[in-house]
Amino acid sequence: MENYQVEQITSKDTYPFLLEIHYARRIPSISFAFGLFRNDELVGVCTFGTSASSTLAKGVCGPDWQKSVIELNRLCLKNNLKNEASFLVGSSLRLLPKPKIVVSYADTTQNHEGIVYQATNFFYTGLSAKFRDPKVKGLEHQHHATYAKGLSNKQVVEKYGSENVYFIDRPRKHRYIIFIGSRTDKKELEKALRYKKQPYPNTAKETQ
C-alpha cells in the first residue's frame, strides 16, 4: 500500500491506542508489537502475547509445540481505512520470529466474525470453549483476569468468600489460527493440529 509501512514498535507505543481507542480499554500481555505508519504517522497497532489460556497453548498442536503458540490479542486502528487492517496483520505476521502458531479471536459481543483474519489466510476452527467467569462483588469494574489471575474458580471463591463471588457465562468467540514458518514447519504443524478446520462463518462487513 502506497505511503504505508509496518515496523516493530515498543509496547508503550501501543498504550494510547489500547487504552483510548480499543473497546477493551486494557493492556494485554505483549511480547511483540507492530505499528502501521501512514506518511510517518502511527495510525494502527497490532500486538501479540502469551495466551491467557495454558490449555489453549497445549491444545492447538500438543505440548511439543506449546512454546510456539502466541495470541494476536489486539488490533486497533485510528481511522480503519480500507485495507489497513489486513495490511497491518499480514505485515506483522511476516515480521514475527518463526516458527509460530498464531491464534486470534473475533469477539461476537462486538459483532466481529473475523473478516481481517479471513483476508489474511487464517483458518477457522469454530467457537471458543464455554467458560464461566468469576465476578467479585465490588470489583465488577475490573476484568476477571486482574483479580483471578492464576487462580481456579474454586480458589477465587476461597479467597474472596462464597457470599462475594458469582459466575457469568463468558461470551464465545470465533477462533482463527495461522502457522508461520518454513514449509517443513507448516507440514509438521498441520500434522499436529488438534482442532478441526471449519468453513468461515458467513459475515457482513464489520469494523475490526
Image (cartoon, grey):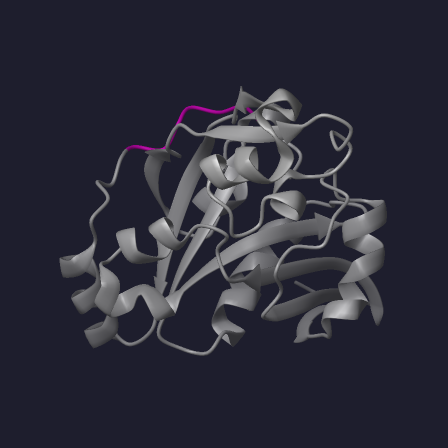
Q: Is 173 inside the magenta-drawn segment?
A: no
- Asked whether 100 or 170 is in front, the reply is 170
x%, y% of residue 55?
35, 50
Q: Quadrant of the C terminus?
A: top right
x%, y% of residue 119?
47, 46
Q: Residue at x 66, y 25 (%)?
A: 164
Q: Main secondary structure of the magenta part?
A: loop
> Relative to 130, is 91 above or below?
below
Q: Residue at x 36, y 50 (%)?
A: 56
Q: Residue at x 53, y 30 (%)?
A: 133
Q: Residue at x 20, y 49 (%)?
A: 194
Question: In the visual, does 67 lie left or right of 170?
Answer: left
Q: Is residue 111 visible?
A: no
- Which quarter of the picture shows residue 11? bottom right
x%, y% of residue 127?
38, 31
Question: In the visual, does 13 lie left or right of 135?
Answer: right
x%, y% of residue 152?
46, 42
Q: Is residue 19 visible?
A: yes
Q: Which residues are magenta?
A: 199-205
Question: In the visual, does 189 lie left or right of 164?
Answer: left
Q: Is 204 inside the magenta-drawn segment?
A: yes
- Asked whether 33 or 158 is in front, the reply is 158
- Asked whether 66 or 131 is in front, the reply is 131
